[in-house]
Image (cartoon, rainbow, N blue to C red):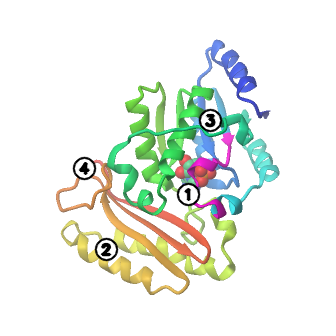
Amino acid sequence: MKIFTTKETLAQYLLQTRAMGKTIGFVPTMGALHAGHLSLIEQAQQNNDEVVCSIFVNPSQFNDPKDLEKYPRTIEADIKMLEQVKCDVLFNPAVNEIYDDNEQWHLNTGELEYLLEGKFRPGHYQGVTQVVYKLFNIVKPDTAYFGQKDYQQFLIISKMAEQLNMPVKLVMCPIRREADGLAMSSRNIQLTAEDRVHALILSKTLNRVKDSFDRNKLAELKQEADRMISKEPGVELEYFEIADGDTLHQANEKTKNIIALVAARVGITRLIDNVLLVHGS
Ligand code: AMP
């Protein structure tokens, strides 16, 4: 695997790759890789000649400096995993390779930015669009792969790409889970053994809602979900919403695409998860 730490050397290499007529698939990550990330890389490998993974813990998307500080960093293990799955290229820049001092950024992606995650992590999506815009400009991928796990992020990045006419195709990949249902996340490393058990209430609740889904009883389903999560010890619910999959506004009986999304703190760790309830009808 080729490893680049500067944007110039990566861009130069990819210029040659493109000149050979090769397509480029891109998987941006913040590292502490797990099988969920690897599933994105596999998907990229199936549909592209060359796959670039980036590992960059992006400071501008953390609204809480303590969260940034404690975010897991496991670069050596990450490199081994990427080599095992035969990823072609890793881009692993330092912060000052991506940002100048006091850089400003604002992109208006409308209401989406302020709902759900946006409410609990003010400014988060400005940081996300800022870094993804920069990474897309450096890598210039044909296709970029993102996880359904960060569903709202996918909607916002799609909106950015559309608004700015970015010539990239975006693909959303399914959520990879542990055998017991917990959605894989870099943050799972931070869970204590006890937290790990309590954290299961999130996927359990999403499954319950999926199994008992009834369009006409959305309010009851939400109430039941709130109740299940709130009574779990060690878990502090931030939101559970049954939402329109396109706008993330509360869903109603007529909504076409419906998704249930949850965020909660389990011990010191903030976890998110979701499940599609109705798709593409
Ligand atoms: P992160 O490193 O958390 O920024 O995630 C990098 C990419 O991996 C994002 O597109 C995530 O949505 C995706 N991802 C994270 N967890 C999972 C998972 N459990 N299954 C599939 N994709 C995931």
The residue to which callout 3 is attached is 45
Pointer 1 local density, CA inside 10 Å: few below 14, some 14–19, many at least 20: some
Instruction: State yes or no: discs 3 and 1 in contact (Cβ < 8 Å).
Output: no
Q: Earlier in the sequence, mark 2 or mark 4?
A: 2
- 252 versus 98 height, above or below: below
Name the residue tied to disc 2.
222
Identify whether 166 is placed above or below 189: above
* The stretch drawn in magenta includes residue 38: no
Q: Position of residue 226 (x, y in %)?
A: 37, 78
Mark 4 / mark 3, whichever is N-terminal: 3
Q: In the rendered image, is residue 222 in sight? A: yes
Relative image position of residue 207 (x, y in whole percent) = 41, 71
Residue at (66%, 35%) from the top-left corner? 100
As shown in the figure, which amino acid type bears the numbered disc 2? Lys
C-beta proximity under 8 Å, tags 1 and 4: no
Mark seen at residue 281:
4
Q: Residue at x 59, y 48 (%)?
A: 60
Answer with mark 1 or mark 2, whichever residue precedes in sequence.
Answer: 1
Q: Foreground: 68 or 241?
A: 68
User: Which quadrant of the rendered structure holds the N terminus?
Assistant: top right
- Taking depth in this image into account, of 49 and 7 the one nearest to the observer is 7
Give, as a three-letter code, the residue at label 1: Asn
Whether ligand 1 has any atom under 8 Å from the Cβ at mark 2 is answered as: no
Q: Residue at x 70, y 63 (%)?
A: 70
